[in-house]
Image (cartoon, rainbow, N blue to C red):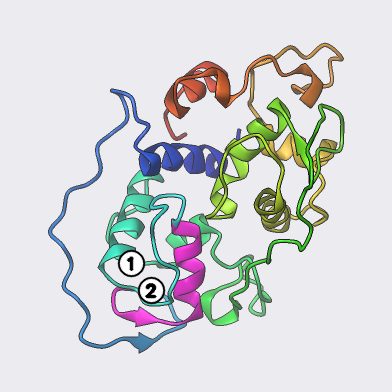
Amino acid sequence: MNRITISFIAAAIVATGLTGPDVAAADHRPAAPVCPSYRTNDQYPIRLCDKGDDVKSIQTRLRSVDSALSIDGYFGPATLRAAREFQRINGLEVDGLVGAATWSALAAGRNGTDNDGSGIVDPDESTYGQLSPPATTCARYRTNDQYPIRLCDKGPAVLVAQAFVWAFEHNLEIDGYFGPQTDVAVRNYQSHNGLEVDGLIGPRTWRAITSGFTCGTDDDQSGLIDPDEIDRSPRDFPDFYAFLIECFGSTTVN
């Protein structure tokens, strides 16, 4: 499983308090001062007392560390703490400054144009934007373990998918029901990973989402556990920590 996916799951454990004895405690630091004023900034590093759409993009990604973080575009003490925690989890320099390395690890530049050819959309090239939930609401949900997993499906495959796209939609509840918020999370994940943005979890999106997942049997020898081959999902464990240990064999961020 890729580093960023592991990071999001580890961050979810920290954010929800579902930690085991081997999960490191948060870095305890003095509270940052409240900013008397905020300055607009779209250049590295984005830091305490900055404001703007780039801060919103950062805050959206930092929801993987602090699920209660406000996405208001003001880089205050709470955003600073979340940035430091994200840096700690991902082995970055823990300084609370969102420089190029932290910005890249956050994948904050999901929208915009890489005008300078650096390989990432930098703060001065990015535009803030989040997909809105689709207007469709599900009158009923159908159990489905076949490709594609989609809006209004339910079951273990949806639970597993939600566990891995949780960080891409801050309102997402991991409940096994593929509703509008899960659709947003899947689309955001697809956009971030260069996949077709259709909200459908077909073989390519499933492979990207669940790389490294082992709670099942690869009966068709496709090289991964397909939706119909899952034998355990997050609901079968007391918490995410136990799920991560059993289905990935580790809680460490590699």
Residue 54 lies in the magenta-colored region: yes
- In depth, the one of 56 and 238 nearer the eye is 238
Give coordinates of residue 67: x percent, y percent: 42, 52
Note whether residue 169 is visible: yes
Residue, disc 1: 97
Which portion, as a residue range, is magenta?
46-62
Q: Check if residue 16 falls in the magenta segment.
A: no
Q: Residue at x 81, y 38 (%)?
A: 149
Circle 2 SS class = loop
Across and down, in percent, residue 109 comes to 58, 68
Q: Which residue is mark 2?
A: 45
What residue is shown at x 50% (from left), y 38% (from top)? 9
Residue 26: numbered disc: none
Q: CA distance from mark 1 to mark 2?
A: 6 Å
For disc 1, the neighbor class at 10 Å (few under 14, some 14 to 19, many from 20) is some
**Label 2 sits on what residue type?**
Pro
Contact check, label 1 and label 2, Cβ < 8 Å: yes
Q: Quadrant of the N terminus?
A: top right
The residue positioned 86% from the left and 29% from the top of the image is: 146
Q: Amino acid at mark 1?
A: Leu
Q: How many marks?
A: 2
Nearer to me, 245 or 41 = 245
